[in-house]
Amino acid sequence: MKLIFLHKYHYGDIPGENTGNATTSRPASTEWPLWEVFIRSKQGLDHKHVGSLHASDAAMAIENARDVYTRRQEGISIWVVESKHIHAADPAEAQSLYDPANDKIYRHPTFYDLPDELTHI
Amino acid sequence: MITEKEQLVSFVLHLADDSLVLGHRNSEWTGHGPILEQDIAISNIALDLIGQARNFYQYAAALKADGATEDTLAYLRDAMDYKNALIAELNKGDWAVTTLRQFFFSTSKFYLYQQLQNNSDTTLAAIAEKSLKEVTYHLRWSAEWVIRLGDGTDESNARVKTALEYLWPYTGELITPASYEQAQPGIDFAALKKNWTNHVLQVLEQALLTPPVNDWMQSGGKQGIHTEHLGYLLAEMQYLQRSYPGCEW
């Protein structure tokens, strides 16, 4: 039996029909790198992934994010990270990665009685 | 004899025209930006400027109190009535002209609004305070582009150098007050000029650019004497209201 190890893929580099970045026909030197944008909508909440954009450097990526993703007051804080630094699990391995959790209901904390005052659980 | 109120109306119209005309020029990039993200950025700036223009026009209309509205002031005045600085009406040119022009323009507005937000005229002060937040971003955005282009590739450097030669003679008007500006209380135009010059030279230096030695300056826009470009701009912008008076959508 062949063991399948986790392969690391750059975001957007997932092979096959899921290929996200098919725009590599131009030479890399003239193509601005891709950045992933994370926005915090209000104080106390997490930064959430909202999309991606092209920019020549981190400063421009933040400005572009401001212009593209916060035009309608969506956020109060912006993170950007170059897409190549994000590694993704291979969707082909989804069965072995995620399905085993299906029948393990004892991992869900559903057997506790929670006081009414507790929200956001 | 020009009354104090007439001077104020001229001053407010000048501020409105500056913002409207440059806003319209920048809007010409919508759908034509060099890259999607910057297309949105320049369109946002265009909208900010047109929003500022509306505030100023509404105030001017209220001051005039002769039936004028923000719309009649924007759409039914001729080029010779427009008081915008010449630099705002020049064609959008390439990205270097657009960003460098925005930088010169926003630097002057930044220091002017900083002073105006404490003006005794509370309406002007309120508009200035609101606009200043937007202008601060325009200034940051445009200065970064000037530095990127100047300190970028051979081509970007050559383009922004050409833009600098072209635009420089139009910068004098930004820091030389017209009579109706000087008539306004509480504005230190000498400080404005000093701040503008310091900031511009500092950014140009970072961008590896030196301003042209010839410092002869164009003027006239603030008095209604415009370049040939404004007529074309107004023809396009005012076409609908001129052809179909009162048209709304």
Image (tube, rainbow, N blue to C red):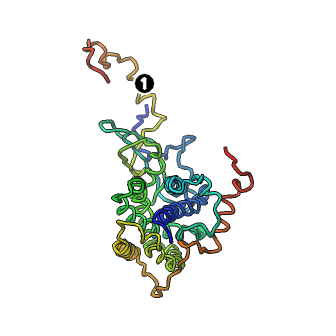
Q: Amino acid at mark 1?
A: Asp
Tell me the SS state at disc 1: helix
Whether residue B48 is visible here, answered yes or no, is: no
- The one nearer the camera, B36 or B75, is B75
Read off the residue under disc 1: A99
Between residue B102 and residue A109, name the one nearer to us: B102
- Give the image location of residue B211, x and y in percent: 44, 81
Q: Is residue B194 visible?
A: yes
Q: Quadrant of the C terminus of chain B?
A: top right
Residue B86 is left or right of residue A66, and the answer is right
Residue found at x 45% / y 68%? B103
Choose between B80 and B86: the one closer to the eye.
B80
Around disc 1, counting alpha carbons within 10 Å, would you say few (fewer than 14), some (14 to 19), or many (20 or more)?
few
Instruction: Pick out the residue farthest to the front.
Output: B1
Q: Position of residue A16 (x, y in %)?
A: 56, 42
Q: Position of residue B82 (x, y in %)?
A: 58, 66
Indicate the position of residue B127 as horizontal and vertical percent values. 43, 54
Please say if B225 is above or below A91: below
The residue at the point 27 percent across, 14 percent down is: A116
Res B240 → quadrant: bottom right
Relative to B200, B249 lies left or right:
right
The vertical placement of A106 against B40, above or below, is above
